[in-house]
Image (cartoon, rainbow, N blue to C red):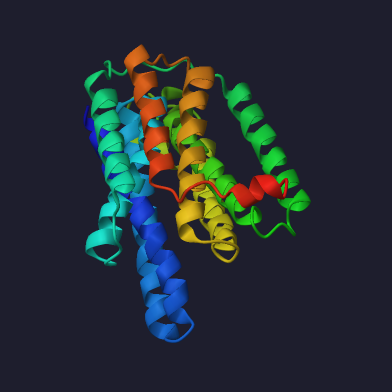
Amino acid sequence: MLSILLAFFAYSLLNISQATQKLALKIAKGKKLIGLCLWIFATLCSSVSIFIVLYAVSIGNASLVGAMAGSGLASLAVFSHFVMKEKIGKKEILGIFIIISASAIIGALSPESKPATIFIEMLFTILGIITVLYVLAWIIFIKRVKIIGIIIGGFAGALGGFIPLFQKVSTSDIGKASSFFSENTSPNEGGLLGLLRIFANPYALIWIVLSIVSIVVLQFSYKRDKAIRIIPSFSTNCLLVPVIGGVLCFQEQLHFGQWIGVGLILVGLFLLTIKINLVLVANKI
């Protein structure tokens, strides 16, 4: 349950930071210094959220922690209402209620975390396939202004979704055993050495690089579309990738009720998003 609560807080911090980044870019057009400082602060908060997720996956299942990715949008809606003075309609209130309720369901049904059976080759294969597909979509739809922002935002979210998966590997015995330090010591050794073994191994470097690339890719999407369309695309991908990856690559099992919770979070994400733009269908985009 603790891992779920930590994940809820981490992804809330992440989504609010993303909205703040978008606001900072707008402010920077008129007040460069203030906009830059605000952007840096928001980026630092985004980085902090990643380390909170790291601890969450170390004590819980990556799939369940990843499922909380959509919960941050509910916090973003509340933040936007009270801080940015944006109105919240009945649809948004219902979406917030559904997401929070679904998060509670997932947390209540969370089993004790068990040692993961890790299939490294499959994890890298899935990462490669998703990356290639999104890059191709980026190239193909680069001139479609009504959809390219959503694609780029989704790509950033997918890359972000792999972060808890590689964090799980880096905190596992496999990751610690691959550490660049003290190869002759037990992978379960604690203290400073144990911390070094979590951060100084190839899998830790991968999730750190993924977090940086995800942030950079997200900045490209901000220049192509509105945050209210980009962030849901980001969050949906950030949710589905670790859920599916946790099941396929770590053999994690979700209770039937938890699958319902994941589905409800996706419903809540939909309700918090602007209505589907039928023009996209009419234009076959």
Q: Is residue 13 above or below residue 222?
A: above
Q: Residue furthest bottom?
A: 30
Residue at 37% of width from left, 52% of height from top?
Answer: 15
Please provide percent x and percent y for residue 282.
69, 47
In front of the other: 248 or 276:
276
Residue 190 visible in the picture: no
Q: Is residue 13 above or below residue 126?
A: below
In front of the other: 196 or 229:
229
Please provide percent x and percent y for residue 177.
47, 27
Q: Quadrant of the N terminus?
A: top left
Please provide percent x and percent y for residue 202.
54, 38
Q: Residue furthest right?
A: 140
Residue at 37% of width from left, 21% of height from top?
Answer: 260
Residue at 40% of width from left, 34% of height from top?
Answer: 267
Please tell me in which quadrant of the rendered image residue 46 appears. Answer: bottom left
Q: Is residue 170 above or below residue 145?
A: above
Please provide percent x and percent y for residue 272.
38, 46
Give the tally of numbered discs: 0
114 left or right, relative to 97: right
Residue 246 visible in the picture: yes
19 left or right, relative to 136: left
In front of the other: 32 or 190:
32
